[in-house]
Structure formats: C-alpha cells, structure tokens
Image (tube, rainbow, N blue to C red):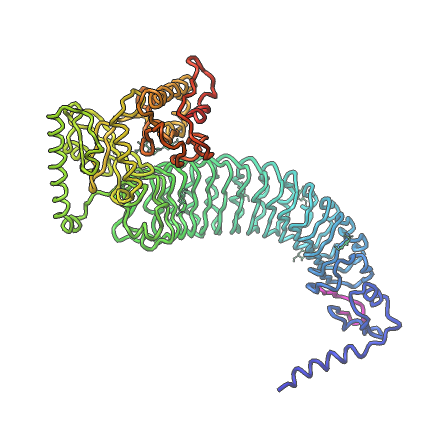
Amino acid sequence: MASPLVLSFVTTAIVVAVVPAYSLPTEAEALLRTGWWSSNGGDNTWGHCIWQGISCNKAGSITRIDRHGAVGSGFFDKLEKLKFCFPNLVYLNLAQFVVNGSIPPQIGDLSSLEYLDLSYNSLTGELPRSLGKLTRLKELKLHDNSFQGSIPMDWGNLKSLMSLKMMSCNIGGPIPYEIGNLKNLSVLSLTKNKLSGLIPSSLSNLSSLSVLYLDSNLLQGPIPHEIGNLKNLQVLSLTRNKLGGSIPSSLSNLSSLSLLYLDSNLLQGPIPHEIGNLKNLKVLSLTTNKLSGLIPSSLSTVSSLSDLYLDSNLLQGPIPREIGNLNLRVLSLSNNPINGSIPLEVFTCPSSTLDLSHNFIEGEIPHRDGNCVFVSNLDLSHNNLTGMIPDIFEAVDTVNLSYNSLQGPIPHYLIDSFGPDSFRGNKHLCANLPGFCDCPASNKVQIAKTIIPIVGILALLLLGCLLYFIFKAKDNIPESNVTKNGDLFSIWNFDGRIAFQDIIKATEDFNFRYCIGTGGYGSVYRAQLPTGKIIALKKLHRREAEVPTFDKSFKNEVKILSEIRHKNIVKLHGFCLHDRCMFLIYEYMARGSLLRVFAGDVEAVELDWIKRVQIIKDIASALSYLHHDCHPPIVHRDISSNNILLNSNLEACISDFGTARPLDPDSSNQTMLVGTYGYVAPDLSDHRSFPLPQIVEIEQKSEDPHALISLKGFCEN
Ligand SMILES: *[C@@H]1O[C@H](CO)[C@@H](O)[C@H](O)[C@H]1NC(C)=O
Ligand SMILES: *[C@@H]1O[C@H](CO)[C@@H](O)[C@H](O)[C@H]1NC(C)=O
Ligand SMILES: *[C@@H]1O[C@H](CO)[C@@H](O)[C@H](O)[C@H]1NC(C)=O
Ligand SMILES: *[C@@H]1O[C@H](CO)[C@@H](O)[C@H](O)[C@H]1NC(C)=O
Ligand SMILES: *[C@@H]1O[C@H](CO)[C@@H](O)[C@H](O)[C@H]1NC(C)=O
Ligand SMILES: *[C@@H]1O[C@H](CO)[C@@H](O)[C@H](O)[C@H]1NC(C)=O
Ligand SMILES: *[C@@H]1O[C@H](CO)[C@@H](O)[C@H](O)[C@H]1NC(C)=O
C-alpha cells in the first residue's frame, strides 16, 4: 500500500546522493554560482542536466532553464547573478522567481533564446537595448515588474517576436515607431503603464496582430486610420487613455474583430455607420466618451453582438427599434440625452441587463399581452416614462423605475421584491407607504370587501362635518376653538364656500392624481373648488395618523394657525380632524417650497438676489409678528427652506407649524430639541438655555447677496 510513496522517496534520494562537487563545466558553474541551485550538480558533462528545471541538448549544453514559480530560491536576489553564458539556451523562465535588480545587458548574448519570461518579479531599472539582439525571440513576457524608462527602439529588431506582454510594469514614454517592424507579432499587451504620445501608425504594419491591448495608459491623439489594416485583429482595447478625435470608419475593415473596447477616452463625433460591417463583433464598449449623434441602426446587422455598452456619452435621438432584433445579453444606454420611447422590440427577450437610466425617454413602458420580459436587471430610472406599471416584472431580478412620471398603484409584489426606493420620485405612483400618495380603492373585489365600513364611515364623516359646518356657519365665528373640540372632526366655513363634500368631490376622494407632493408626514393635494378657488390639502395617511407624534403635530398646527393671521404666514382655511380623516386646508402656494425653487435650474436663476432679499423680509416680518405681536409669543422651531412657501408672485409664507409652540414666559427656560437639525435656533441645538425670542432686524435696503445665508442664523433668536 505504501510502496508508491517509498519509491518516489528513493528516486529523490538517489539524485541527491550522486553529486560530488568538482570539475563542473562552465555552464553548470554559472548556475551553481547563483546559489539558486544547491550543490547537487553532476560530476560530468551531464550532471547538471538533471538539476531542477534544467534541460540540455545532446552535447550537454543547457537549452532550458525553467524555475518559474519557485518563489524563495532567488528571493530578492539580483538577476545578474545568472551569468548569461548559455549559447544554446532557447527557453528561460524565471517568472515569479522573485528576483530584483535590473535586467543586465548581457541578456543580449543569449543568441538562441526563443522564450523569455521574467514576469511577476521585482525587476527595476531601464529595459536593456541589447535585448533587441535576440532576433530568434518569439515570446517575451516582462509584465508585473517595476521598470523605469521606455521601450528601446532597438527592440524593433525582434523580427521573430510573436507575443510581447508588458502589462503593469511601469514603463513610460512613447510606443516606438519601430514596433511596426515586428511583422510576426500576434499578441501585444502594454496595459496599465504610463505610455504617452500617439499610437504609432506603424502598428498597422503588424499584419499578424490578433490581440492588441493598449488600455490604461496616457495615450493621446486620434486612433490612427491605418488601424483598419489589421485584418487579423480579434481583440482591440484602447480603454482608459486620453484618445480624442472620432472613431475611424476604417475600423469597419477589421473583419475578424470580436471584442472592441474604446471606453473612457475623449472620443467625439458620431459612431460610424460602418460599424455594422463588423460581422464577428461580440462586445462593443464605447462607454464614457463624448460620442454624439444617433445610435446607428446598422448595429442591428451585427448578429453576433451580445454586449453593447454605449452609456455616458452624448448620444441623442430615439433607440433604434432594429436593435431589438439582436440577441443582446447586455444593453447599456444610460446617461445619454436619448429621447423618444422604448421600442417594444428592445424590451423583450432575452437580454439579461437593460439599463436605460438617466435619459429623456418618454412614453409608456412597452408590453404586449402574453409577451414575456426576460430582462433580469432592468434600470429605467431618471427618465420621463408615463402610464401605469405593467404587470410584467415577475421574472425580473432587479428593477428600478424611480424618478419618472409613472402613475397608478404599485403592485404589492413589486414593493415586496424590490423595495420602495425603486419607485420613488414618481409623483403619481401610489402605495400605502410613507413617501407615497395613498391609493384610491379601485379593485372591485376590494370595494366589495370593504364597501360597508367605508360607506358607513364616509356617511358619518359627511354628516359630522356638515353638522359642524352648519353649526359654525350659524354661529358666524370663523375661528374654531380646537382645544374644546380637539377629538372631534371639525371644518369651518371659509367665506361660506368650502364644505366637506366639495373637497371630496374636488379631489375625487383624495385620488392620487391630485397629489402634488409628500412631506415628512402626509401628502399634499391640490384641489379646485366649484367656485374656482384653488386650495392645498395636507392629509395624513392612515398609517401615519396612528403615530401619536404626527397626530399631535397635526393638531398643534391647527391650534396655532387658527389663532394667528399674518400675510406671510400660510393661511389655514379649515381642517378635518378625526381618526379616519385628517386633513388641513390651506391657501394654495403655486411655486411650492423655497427648497424646491432652489433645486430647479431655471427657477433658482429667476430668483435673483433682489427677490431673495424680499423673501427674507417677508419671513422676518412673519417671525417678528410671531415673536412680538402674539400673546403669548409663538416660536416656530423649524424654519427651513422646506417650510417657506412661495405664491405665484414670489411672496413668501411660513408654513408647517407642527412643532411650533406658544412661549410661556413664566415656564422653565429649558426646551426639548425639535425640528430640522441645522435650522433650529443655535441656542436650541447647543442645548443651552432658551432666551426670549428676539428678532434680528434686517436692514431695510439690504441687497447683500449673502443675505440669504444669514437667514439660517437669524431664525429665532
Ligand atoms: C532587492 O530586494 C531586497 C529586499 O527587498 C532589497 O533589500 C534590495 O535592496 C533590493 N535590491 C535592488 C537592487 O533593488
Ligand atoms: C514569421 O512567421 C512565419 C509563419 O509562422 C514564419 O514562416 C517566418 O519565418 C516568421 N518570420 C520570422 C522573421 O521569424
Ligand atoms: C510598413 O512597412 C513598409 C515596408 O515593409 C513601409 O514601407 C511602410 O512605411 C510601413 N508603414 C508604416 C505605416 O509604418
Ligand atoms: C477597407 O479596406 C479597403 C481595401 O482593403 C479600402 O478600399 C477601404 O477604403 C477600407 N474601408 C475603410 C472604411 O477604410
Ligand atoms: C429628440 O431630440 C431631438 C434633438 O434634441 C429633437 O430634434 C427631437 O424632436 C426629439 N424627439 C422627441 C421624440 O422628442
Ligand atoms: C415629462 O413629460 C410630460 C408630459 O409628456 C411633460 O409635461 C414634462 O415636461 C416632461 N418632463 C420632463 C422633465 O421632460
Ligand atoms: C434606483 O435608482 C435610484 C436613483 O438612481 C437610487 O437612489 C435607488 O437606490 C435605486 N434603487 C435600487 C433598488 O437600486
């Protein structure tokens, strides 16, 4: 049973045993002096030929030295320790042998050498010019070292060279023109260096070239037109350089090309129509350039294409529907100014990744009954897609529809599978989730299930609100005392014209179509009353209404706002407070919040400094009123650009009094921190004692452009 093991041990033992160390031939002596072979040499012409990694010819002269991967033996020793006196050496492989120092010029004496591999070492220094003397060399691997300087011109004499691999070895300078002399070169990889200057047009003379990697360098200038001569090229990667100009149409003559990577350069102009001639192309990556014009429909004739990356360019126009005829695995067109709609053909089987995000695509998400979508990763975010979400995403792994103009309910299984973040930023999508407008009950089965309680509640509500409204109207007291009726739903008559049923009618029972935004809590609806008057409604979602703090701040807002009146404080026209129905009715502020205005490119510019100063005056006036004219004084405690609303004349109003409170001067000076951190008065966020509110006066004629910034500072102290 143990015999194979014993046998192999015996063989090794014999090798070691037969080694007296005298009268070695010169070649063996050269090996021995390195110290990389232990003195297990031979005592005759043949002895060293059985050392590890050594082969000899019939005459006992060394033809192969292969110590690759023998990490340790030459560990951080100088390569020059190996005297290069091997006239018959054909093969030298010291890859991962971890030698350091530079390549000695004597390497040029290895006149028979056909294969040289010094990759994965710690070699430094300049590349020796003498290496160019190795005219029989077929393969040269120097990658993964830390050389200095550039590729010597003399290497243009390596006439037999078929493969040159010098990735990640820290070489700089230009690619020598003489490289065009290496007529038999089939593989050239100079990836991840610091090569600069132009791609030499002489490269086009390398008629045997099948693989060319020049990526991750500092190459500049155009892609030479002559590159179209490389008829045997199968792989071309020029990724991550600084190449400019346009994509030469001559590329279309590279009829063997299978992989083409030109991404992360400065290429501009259109994608040449002729690219459709590359009949063997599998991967085309033109990502992150400045390519413009249309996506050429000729791409649809490249039937072998599987991965198409055109993202992060300036490509315009519609997605050509012919592209849908391809069997693409990946189609990435994100971050372009592409417009038009998504062609059904592009959307259907069997691609696995479809990324159309960050474009200007409009129209509906296409679908055809019974037509599967086999896309497994779908990103349509940041477009302007409209319509409902079609029911086609069951087999999809990831989906992102955020930041579009989609509408209607989000199917439950989608939220469960992909989370709410995949749907945000669609104003008219609804779901019973924080951050989304409530869905109206639409499903017939659901209606049937819930019709009795809903009708009951609505009837009660309507009756209650109406009674209250009539009662109040008769009383002719516009302000209601909420503390007395705090637990009841209330609505008061505004100019005798707002009634509960008007609101239900105007919003079609809070249909999501009328939802204009969602806040920290609740949704805001825009409603046009029968009189033509437009109002804003803030409604708590059912789930949120159950959160005591929301409920409390809602009631607080009613209490405070019903007691104060100022032209720069948002007007509360009415409210309805009840377990099942909580909404506040405000005047409609057409321009929305200051935050929103600042976020808009056009609107922010329109709001020049003069207007901004006016807004500050408006707010100062409102705060002055709250602090000095109200008894007891009221502190807002959450002045932020989100809570400042602008009407169509850009007049500002303070809103959101959910956390405001009257200040009882006799009570303790300590207060709990509420509101938006960063906007509350500094005294509060520092947890220091709270002083009596004192407004900092703003100079009447101030046109200081920084005035806006001081808004943060002066808010409440
Ligand atoms: C070779 O590496 C060793 C160990 O890191 C270092 O001490 C030595 O200076 C290096 N020699 C050269 C010539 O870089
Ligand atoms: C180039 O390759 C061809 C075909 O493999 C061969 O016949 C020729 O000798 C090579 N040329 C040189 C200079 O090695
Ligand atoms: C290609 O090689 C021929 C000779 O073999 C030479 O005349 C010509 O200039 C070379 N072309 C380039 C672009 O280097
Ligand atoms: C492709 O090569 C042919 C000759 O082989 C040439 O006539 C033609 O102009 C080339 N096409 C392009 C677009 O460079
Ligand atoms: C797409 O954009 C182009 C250029 O901006 C414009 O001419 C064209 O009308 C747009 N097409 C659609 C469908 O919006
Ligand atoms: C989105 O489309 C709608 C209607 O088609 C249009 O009113 C709106 O301006 C578009 N939005 C953007 C950002 O293009
Ligand atoms: C969808 O895209 C948006 C915006 O780019 C991003 O915030 C969100 O995290 C994405 N959702 C998912 C599920 O990846």
What residue is at 62 percent from the left and 47 percent from the top?
192
What residue is at 82 percent from the left and 66 percent from the top?
32
Q: Which residues are magenta?
A: 55-67
Ligand 1 sits in quadrant: bottom right
What residue is at 74 percent from the left and 62 percent from the top?
90
Q: How far across and how far down the image is residue 108, in percent?
A: 79, 54
Quarter that holds the N terminus? bottom right
Q: Is residue 455 left or right of residue 705?
A: left
* Residue 291 shows up from this direction: yes
Q: How far across and how far down the image is residue 440, in percent?
A: 21, 42
Instruction: Tell me the quarter of the picture where residue 459 sits.
Output: top left
Most extreme residue toward the right is: 23
Q: Is residue 608 magenta?
A: no
Quarter that holds the C terminus? top left
> Depth check: 526 or 682 in front?
682
> Depth check: 132 or 312 in front?
312
Q: How far across and how far down the image is residue 559, in percent?
A: 26, 31
586 relative to 174, above or below = above
* Residue 650 shows up from this direction: no
All told, the count of numbered labels is 0
